[in-house]
Amino acid sequence: MADSTPSPHSSAHPTPDRPVYVIGGGPGGLAAAYALRARGIRAVVLEKSDRVGASWRRHYDRLHLHTTRRLSALPGLPMPRRFGRWVSRDNVVRYLEKYAEHHRLEIVTGVEVSRIERAPDGTGWLLHATGGRELTGSAVVVATGYNHTPRLPDWPGREAFTGEFLHAGEYRDGAPYAGRDVLVVGIGNTGAEIAVDLVESGAARVRLAVRTVPHLVRRSTAGWAAQYSAVLVRHLPVGLVDRISRVQAKVAIPDLSAHGLPRPDTGLYTRVKQGAIPVQDVGLIDAVRKGKVEIVAAVESFEGDGKIVLADGTRLSPDAVIAATGYVRALEGLVGHLDVLDARGKPVVHGARSPKTAPGLYFTGFTNPISGNLRELALDAVRIAKAIARDSSA
Ligand SMILES: Cc1cc2nc3c(=O)[nH]c(=O)nc-3n(C[C@H](O)[C@H](O)[C@H](O)COP(=O)(O)OP(=O)(O)OC[C@H]3O[C@@H](n4cnc5c(N)ncnc54)[C@H](O)[C@@H]3O)c2cc1C
């Protein structure tokens, strides 16, 4: 048993009135809640929206998982075979709903946690939430999502732009852009897929602004999913994986230099370590080769007359701009005061590890692993539950 005198740095035992709070009802939070429940620990999920899987409900219509069905399932419930190999957005949402129901998870919706503090008695954590609620938990799992808040670069003149402007997070489908000239900014997986979607939806012109040339990979080759290779090479030396992937790319990916997409100078795995995962081809290579998606330089600034200035000095006047410029984790308000974030706002620990200065505080889902975030979330859920169970029996 733990010392009965609480020290300011001790974690607490989960009890019915001091459960483990899991913040966020996305895949990461649901998986953690299930894994805790499976160990007999009461876990309560606090979700700010009115339903689970809020992020997935907002994603664009054509989205399918880039990771395979089997390697994207959460612990304790496989995804049904009928969802196919590459699961659609709607089926991801169905699965998350089913997951919560199947495991009878305790979920409170409409509750947004704004700040986490140590409980005044020194054990556990005090959560400040919507409507002045104060909840005390024995431990906390933060699962509020890597893709939390849209990130928009601070482009000079952007406010004065008269055309349509939106973040990719607001994009649903290409229908409103049929017959229009659209500039997509950013060639991550999202920007690449939206550009293809626009072409297929009849946009008159689609340009894709690229700052750093990405690594392109086929989603699968002769039935072998790119994700399988990613899982296999995860623990190999970075230089070796860089070399293997360079050879692979030469075989599988055509040279697109003439179209503005030369092969990157930096290796694939080196880039992953810097936080940039490769772009899976869902039609971009073909669209670029056929000139249906034109690659242009990065956006530098906006001008009042509806013009956009690119890094090479070119000026464009598209009807609409879709900024596929990523997201920020936005953890500062929640835990910034606890000294658990690095200079880039990323938690200093992840998964089963809890910060030394904040025992009982866990983070899941804040990395972008090459092997698939859902797969890692599922593994982390089990590890976190094990760590909490171990701490509470200590
Ligand atoms: C377009 C896109 C495609 C992706 N495709 C894949 C893929 O194919 N394979 C893969 O493995 N991964 C993929 N990912 C990455 C990742 O798996 C998903 O983003 C996944 O949803 C992450 O789960 P999560 O639970 O960490 O976060 P989220 O799903 O974002 O869930 C976080 C939840 O927390 C809630 N929340 C946030 N803040 C608070 C708060 N303060 N209080 C209470 N609730 C809060 C939110 O409402 C949300 O419901 C993709 C991501 C994106 C953006």
Image: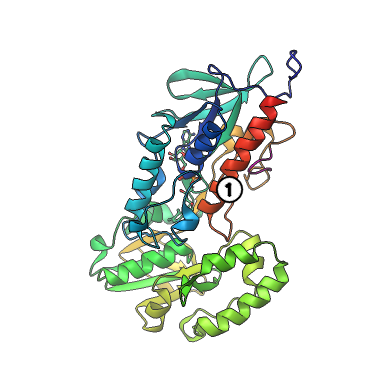
For label 1, the SS is: helix
Total numbered badges shown on the rendered structure: 1
Q: Left or right? Give the position of 188 relative to 160.
A: right
User: Where is mark 1, residue-wise?
Assistant: 379
Magenta region includes residue 352: yes
> How far across and how far down the image is residue 103, in percent?
43, 35
Identify the image quadrant of residue 334: top right
Nearest to the observer: residue 101 or residue 281: 101
Q: Left or right? Give the position of 99 relative to 164.
A: right
Is residue 155 visible in the rendered structure shown here? no
Which residue occupies 66% across, 73% down? 242
Magenta region includes residue 170: no
Q: Which residues are magenta?
A: 348-353
Which residue occupies 50% across, 36% down? 34
Location of residue 289 with respect to 323 vertically, above or below: below
> How far across and how far down the image is residue 160, in percent?
38, 54
> How far across and how far down the image is residue 8, in percent?
73, 20
Location of residue 103 with respect to 242 vertically, above or below: above
Callout 1: CB less than 8 Å from ligand 1: no
Is the N terminus in the top left, top right, bottom left or bottom right quadrant? top right
